[in-house]
Image (tube, grey):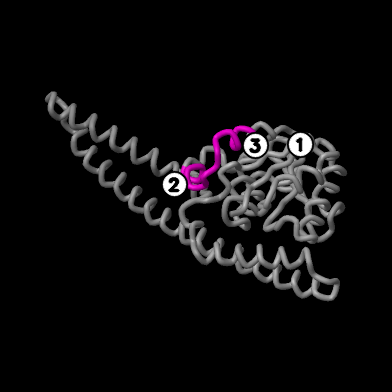
Amino acid sequence: MANIIVIPFKDKTKAIDALHKIKELDAYGDITLYEHILIRKDDNNHYEVLDNKTDGEGWRTFTGMALGGLVGAFAGPIGFVIGLYSGTAAGAIWDINHFDFENNFIRKVSNTMTVGTIAIIAEVAEDSSVFIDDALKSYSSEIIRSEAGIDFDDYIDEQIEDIEEEIEDERQKLKKATENEKAKIKAKIADLKAKRKAKIATLDAKRKSVLKEVKDKTTSQINKLEKRLKGYEQSVASTFRKARKNRLEKRIKREEEKLYQLHNALGEDIVD
């Protein structure tokens, strides 16, 4: 399975050059680069994102709210890590549990969230860390990797694994291919990457649909409990009624905490 890597920089030129090196490794077949983004925290609520089509001149500025929409375009764990780095995923407990990242990885990523820091966030398949580590030796002193990768829930899906195995086979062929064969192999790899991305997006949509259903049921349960609670608020003279009222209040609080987590997992704003 693929790993998520985060590489922080202080210098924009070095960050762009390092991204080019990673793309070269992908072109040579040494690694497989699935998704990537180059992002800089401009201030507490503004972020710069590099447009891959122009590499170097296509920086776009987003507010935290607008960036949340961009994060949604990256289905799967890379979207969550972008949100973690930018602060738009803060408190998303369901997502942290869903993506099986090590606590150490999350802590290190959180520590890079300082103003002015540029980060490459990428999803890569690598046989060994040597390729990226050696290629970026002169550009960055730190490469943060997810030790657990993205082996979790829906991603243990045979269709995803089959596609990744096909990509790996083509990557090995690329290393031995003649110049005439390389273009055809690269085109096939690009097609397989697109299929993998589409499958991940489908799984992510399915996950959000389930969360939405749970959220709706939780909201309904809160409404029912609140109606019952109002019935006891009219008369709480007896010890029995007071105790039952307290139990209802505790149950409502638990359900509200669950609802808050569901809002975060779905990337929704909390509206009273």
Circle 1: element type = loop
Q: Tell me which segment is drawn in magenta.
A: 94-109
Cβ–Cβ under 8 Å for marks 3 and 2: no
Which residue has dot 1 on it?
A: 117
- Tag count in the figure? 3
Give residue 105's position: percent from left, percent from top.
60, 37
Could you tell which of marks 2 and 1 lies nearer the N-terminus?
1
Could you tell which of marks 3 and 2 lies nearer the N-terminus?
3
Pick whichever, 210 or 61, lies toward us.
Answer: 210
Could you tell which of marks 3 and 1 lies nearer the N-terminus?
3
What's the CA distance linking mark 2 and mark 1?
Answer: 30 Å
10 Å neighbourhood of mark 3: few (<14), some, or many (≥20)?
many
The residue at 60%/64% (across/down) is 165
Which residue has dot 2 on it?
A: 262
Asked whether residue 104 is drawn in magenta, I would say yes
Q: Is residue 202 above or below residue 230?
A: below
10 Å neighbourhood of mark 2: few (<14), some, or many (≥20)?
many
Lateral position of residue 209 relative to residue 185, left or right: left
Pick whichever, 156 or 56, lies toward us.
Answer: 156
Asked whether residue 105 is drawn in magenta, I would say yes
10 Å neighbourhood of mark 1: few (<14), some, or many (≥20)?
some
Magenta stretch prevailing secondary structure: helix
Which residue has dot 3 on it?
A: 109
Q: Is residue 53 above or below residue 80?
A: below
Give residue 269's position: percent from left, percent from top.
52, 46
- Displayed quadrant of residue 197: bottom right
